[in-house]
Image (spheres, coloured by chain):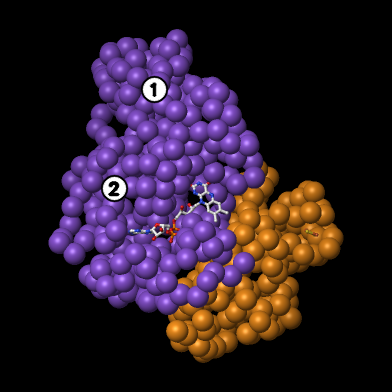
């Protein structure tokens, strides 16, 4: 039996009837056409599908769309505001935090979660924070530098406020 | 990687969840964070016909102190326990164990209640539950009952919770006096689960001798167990390096070790000893 859900994704509210077995990642990609969220492993391991669900980074291949009923979700499409990149996106751009880009949306969401909880992370803390996200291209070094760049940017912005 | 079809019901109250379990029997399963159940359903290792989501029930996710115990609601996430400043002060083992689980995304979603009821032999919480001598408060059709951690873990993926029951709360007795706690784990490099995990909760007397020790071991056997031999070897002695090593050598006594592709039984037995020694010494260090 289908269940009604209502979710707010990147500020826009959607209402649909979904089969309970539909995974959140499939709902985002196939129903809402938000294909920025990638599917890598589908087994909760690679982190490519990471999105923010009520402010918490989650692997959307391991959440049922029905579980997200009522939630506020931010996908990578919602990170830039009025055409201005989020500081973490800017970091990935400036420090070459990506090669093929497959892991990038999930990496950015996980990194943003880290900087929200810990604005001044050590390198080890950055590596721990993205341990649930696999990258097959970069060797992680540039991703770490991208997060460090973003941390500095966000601190600078906070100081300027 | 899509589960077989099922019906989804978001329970509004604990009573409703218990009633739904009673009505649907074996066909139904409780859904908490879904981070063990949903993967199992995707692999079709589990094919429940009805999922009863308890995440929308009010007041099932909380951390409260009552007298000499900490009350943790079953729906409390690993992250909530890891990040609570109060938990770090009154029950550091809980925070340390929570932080050792999986990755950030898993800790944001997964719950302590789901983990203990799932009773994965490689899960981290069971070791801490035994070391802290917690009590599990289960709600059923006939009311509530309390199950001690030592009686709770029965076998591989099997606990003492009855089919119609919902775990509501975990009660953690808070240690008094000079106490030290530690959780040490050998992480599986791919899955993050515990190849072996040892939780130690001990108390020192005024002379610095070990007055009491409670040690839980996970990952090593079909279910988490109490390392009784190691506890006895510590109690009454000054817990120096030699005593810790002698106690650790008894941590896997009379237990059959798991054996798999990653770690043979013999290797696991060795890991239990090494991990137990490190955890005991870390707990002693924390007690000073
Ligand atoms: C990628 C990944 C890595 C992980 N790494 C680790 C790790 O390193 N260490 C570790 O310990 N765990 C690990 N886990 C498991 C994780 O901690 C799970 O969250 C946890 O085991 C189950 O909790 P849950 O809330 O997700 O439960 P669910 O998956 O919702 O439920 C699990 C089982 O318990 C039952 N249940 C749940 N809550 C209740 C309740 N209150 N009353 C009665 N029955 C209930 C369900 O019916 C189901 O059978 C990992 C999981 C993933 C996906
Ligand atoms: S697709 Fe979700 S973790 Fe890999
Ligand atoms: S950039 Fe290719 S997987 Fe990370």
- Between A5 and B165, the one lying in front of the other is B165
Q: Colour of chain A?
A: orange
Please name the residue that numbered disc 2 is placed on: B160
Q: Quick one: which chain is purple?
A: B
| Vertical side of A3 occupied by A113: above or below | above
Give the image quarter of residue B155. Answer: top left
Left or right, residue B149 beside residue A27: left
Residue B89 visible in the shown view: no
Q: Are marks 2 and 1 in contact (CB under 8 Å)?
A: no
Whole-Å distance between the Cαs marked 2 and 1?
22 Å
Q: Indicate which disc residue A91 carries.
A: none
Tell me the residue at 41%/48% (across/down): B157
* Place of residue B188 in the rendered image (x, y in percent of width and height, measured from the top left): 60, 40
- Between A117 and A25, the one lying in front of the other is A25
| Vertical side of B252 occupied by A32: above or below | below
Residue B216 visible in the shown view: yes
- Between A30 and A152, the one lying in front of the other is A30
Please name the residue that numbered disc 1 is placed on: B254
Tell me the residue at 41%/38% (across/down): B223
Q: Which quadrant is the N terminus of chain A positioned in?
A: bottom left
* Place of residue A124 in the rendered image (x, y in percent of width and height, measured from the top left): 65, 43
Q: Chain of mark 1?
A: B
The quarter of the image that holds ligand 1 is: bottom left
- Between A124 and A138, the one lying in front of the other is A138
Tell me the residue at 15%/60% (across/down): B143
Q: Secondary structure at mark 2?
A: loop
């Amino acid at each position: 039996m289908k269940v009604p859900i209502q979710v707010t994704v990147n500020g826009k509210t959607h209402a649909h009837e979904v089969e309970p077995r539909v995974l959140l990642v499939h709902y985002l990609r196939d129903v809402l056409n938000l294909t920025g969220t990638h599917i890598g492993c589908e087994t909760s391991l690679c982190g490519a599908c990471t999105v923010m669900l009520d402010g918490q980074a989650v692997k959307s291949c391991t959440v049922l769309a029905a579980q997200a009923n009522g939630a506020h979700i931010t996908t990578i499409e919602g990170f830039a505001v009025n055409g201005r990149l989020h500081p973490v996106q800017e970091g990935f751009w400036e420090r070459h935090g990506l090669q093929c880009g497959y892991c990038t949306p999930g990496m950015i969401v996980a990194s943003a979660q880290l900087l929200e909880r810990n604005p001044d992370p050590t390198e080890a803390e950055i590596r721990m924070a993205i341990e649930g996200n696999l990258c097959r291209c970069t060797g992680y070094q540039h991703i770490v530098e991208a997060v460090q760049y973003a941390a500095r940017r966000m601190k600078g912005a906070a100081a300027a406020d | 990687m899509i589960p077989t079809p099922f019906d989804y019901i978001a329970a509004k109250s604990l009573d409703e969840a218990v009633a739904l379990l009673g009505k649907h029997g074996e066909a139904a399963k409780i859904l908490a964070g879904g981070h063990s159940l949903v993967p199992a359903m995707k692999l079709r290792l589990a094919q429940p016909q009805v999922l009863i989501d308890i995440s929308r029930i009010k007041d099932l996710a909380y951390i409260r102190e009552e007298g000499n115990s900490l009350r943790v609601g079953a729906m409390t996430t690993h992250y909530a326990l890891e990040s609570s400043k109060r938990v770090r002060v009154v029950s550091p083992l809980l925070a340390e164990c929570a932080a050792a689980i999986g990755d950030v995304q898993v800790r944001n979603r997964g719950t302590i209640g789901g983990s203990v009821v799932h009773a994965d032999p490689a899960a981290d919480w069971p070791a801490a539950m035994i070391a802290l001598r917690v009590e599990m408060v289960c709600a059923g059709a006939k009311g509530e009952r309390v199950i001690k951690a030592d009686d709770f873990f029965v076998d591989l993926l099997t606990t003492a919770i009855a089919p119609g029951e919902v775990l509501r709360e975990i009660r953690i007795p808070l240690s008094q006096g000079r106490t030290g706690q530690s959780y040490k784990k050998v992480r599986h490099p791919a899955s993050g689960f515990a190849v072996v995990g040892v939780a130690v909760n001990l108390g020192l007397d005024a002379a610095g001798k070990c007055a009491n020790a409670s040690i839980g071991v996970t990952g090593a056997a079909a279910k988490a167990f109490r390392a009784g031999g190691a506890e006895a070897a510590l109690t009454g002695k000054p817990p120096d390096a030699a005593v810790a090593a002698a106690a650790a050598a008894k941590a896997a006594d009379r237990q059959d070790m798991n054996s798999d592709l990653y770690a043979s039984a013999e290797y696991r037995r060795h890991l239990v000893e090494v991990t137990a020694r490190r955890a005991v010494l870390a707990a002693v260090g924390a007690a000073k």
